[in-house]
Amino acid sequence: SAEKELLAKNDLLAKTNRELDRFVYSASHDLRAPLSSLLGLIEVAHKTSDPAEINQCLDLMRQRVNNMDGFIKEIIDFSRNTRQEVKQEQFNLLIFIKEIVEDLKFAEGMEQIYVRLDIAPDLEIISDTTRLKVVLNNLIGNAFKYHDPQKEQQEVYIKAQVEEHMVRIDIEDNGLGIATEHQPKIFEMFYRASEKSQGSGLGLYIVQETLAKLKGAIQLRSAPAKGSTFSVW
């Protein structure tokens, strides 16, 4: 009925407003923190004439700028996903994933991680490539980022299979894993599983929201010190 529709719209509006408030609060905090840090590092660099110290400051500054850049990219992904129409494009999944893996390995300096792909070379799928790239960039990027340096063999295994009218993509790693108490919350906006978490805490929230637009779903299986598997439909 019209009344039910109106109530549903009001609920959605309330949810959007709550998320927007949290988003503005957290985003401004997350953008200001690296700026304060940069100002501090500039002060330190001003006060020293030791080239080694100055180089260290420059390295730390680059790190802060990269963090901010990554965060701003995530905000753009978030905004695009909310507003843009979903496109239907046909493409080869193996080629698509290979490109993402190559870009990420090169950017993160993760040459030591062995990536195993189990995807039929002729598997063509129909989806929105921009949105799917955001999803897979996040998930494969996390598998690299949270690898376990203690393990001799550091691996990421990416598998795709057709299940009825959907494609299921599994991204499995033998990295650090996620503690059980954090697992129910990792898809929340700005949730960070630990102080060591790199990044904004927006990534998995964006993954879930983007998949909702693609009428897809995501599931996690993880054990600390063993690794994580994200399954995407």
Image (cartoon, rainbow, N blue to C red):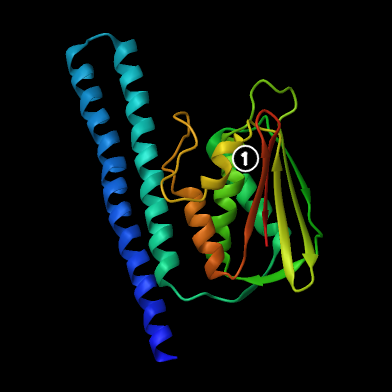
Q: Secondary structure at mark 1?
A: helix
Give the answer, above or below, for where 7 lies relative to 224.
below
Residue in front for this viewpoint, 43 or 189: 189
Say left or right for 77 vs 22.
Answer: right
Say left or right for 151 vs 80.
Answer: right
Please state the horizontal and vertical placement of residue 9, each as a whole percent of the image.
Answer: 38, 78
Say left or right for 124 vs 88.
Answer: right
Please state the horizontal and vertical placement of residue 26, each as a whole percent of the image.
Answer: 31, 46
Occupied quadrant, residue 211: bottom right
Give the answer, above or below, for where 29 lies relative to 110.
below
Give the answer, above or below, for where 128 lies relative to 208.
below
Going 64% across and 47% down the picture, which residue do you hit?
101
Give the answer, above or below, for where 203 lies relative to 94.
above
Please state the horizontal and vertical placement of residue 86, each as a whole percent of the image.
Answer: 52, 74
Residue in front for this viewpoint, 1 or 178: 1
Which residue type does callout 1 highlight?
A: Ala
Please state the horizontal and vertical placement of residue 32, each as a whole percent of the image.
Answer: 25, 39
> Within 10 angstroms of label 1, few (less than 14), some, or many (20 or more) residues?
many
Residue in front for this viewpoint, 154 or 201: 201
> Mark 1 — residue?
143
